[in-house]
Amino acid sequence: MSLRPDLAIIADHVEPGARVLDIGCGDGALMAALRDGRRVDARGLEIDSANVSAAIARGLSVVQGDADVDLAGYPDKSFDYAILSQTLQTARNPHLVLDQLLRIGERAFVSFPNFAHWRVRASLLWGGRMPVTNVLPERWYDTPNIHHVTIDDFRALLKERRIAVEGAWFLNRGRPTSSAAANFRAEHAVFLLKR
């Protein structure tokens, strides 16, 4: 089974044998890949009960919970990596979730769809409607996204909160793209962070 492109980047950069907490882990695809390919001790937190069941059926350790409220119960630095893939934009308080990630983990991976991608801009400019794309497949009224984050907005938040970027990857149509003009050219971003 192949991983979603942002998850593949994360999987390639997690050190073998690491302790990982995957927040918003979905059906556990990344956790299973890390467990099987890198001998990682992976734990998950997922809000959707069907996804929790699917992850548990894979033999994974996943609990049902909400990143906005349930991360406070985890001890400081209890994981090597905290992972938040395509979940930041669904959090009620993304800046607080980000703080929790870096409290719980030595490092944090964060991936998100870039709402400043040129196709999104064009959809708004020429069609006057919220875009529906491969990366943003839901319509405005059924999307889980409550915060529309751009790469430049995220970088500004990191600077404000004094969070260091150890790595950054940008994707367009599932393929790596240059960091040059990433806020305009990239559909998706992946950051590796450390405080």
Image (cartoon, rainbow, N blue to C red):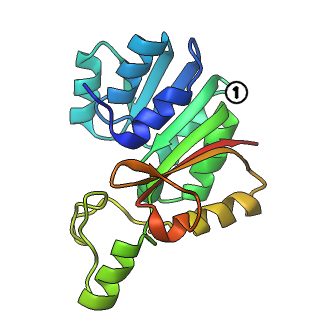
- Residue 20, by quadrant, is top right
Q: Position of residue 31 (x, y in %)?
A: 40, 24
Q: Position of residue 52 (x, y in %)?
A: 29, 29
Residue 176 visible in the picture: yes
Up/down of 14 relative to 128, above or below = above
Relative placement, left or right, of 194 versus 111 is: right
Residue 23 visible in the picture: no
Up/down of 33 relative to 178, above or below = above
- Residue 85, by quadrant, is top left
Q: Residue at x 60, y 29 (%)?
A: 81
The secondary element bearing badge 1 is classed as loop
- List the residue tagged with mark 1: 77
Q: Nearer the viewer, residue 88 or 13?
A: 13
Q: Amino acid at mark 1?
A: Lys
Q: Residue at x 47, y 36 (%)?
A: 9
Up/down of 182 relative to 34, above or below = below
Q: Residue at x 21, y 69 (%)?
A: 139
Q: Nearer the viewer, residue 5 or 111?
A: 5
Q: Nearer the viewer, residue 71 or 143?
A: 143
**How many residues crowd around disc 1 within 10 Å: few (fewer than 14), some, or many (20 or more)?**
some
- Residue 80, by quadrant, is top right
Q: Quadrant of the N terminus?
A: top left
Report the number of discs.
Answer: 1
Q: Position of residue 32 (x, y in %)?
A: 36, 19
Q: Quadrant of the C terminus?
A: top right
Q: Residue at x 23, y 17 (%)?
A: 57
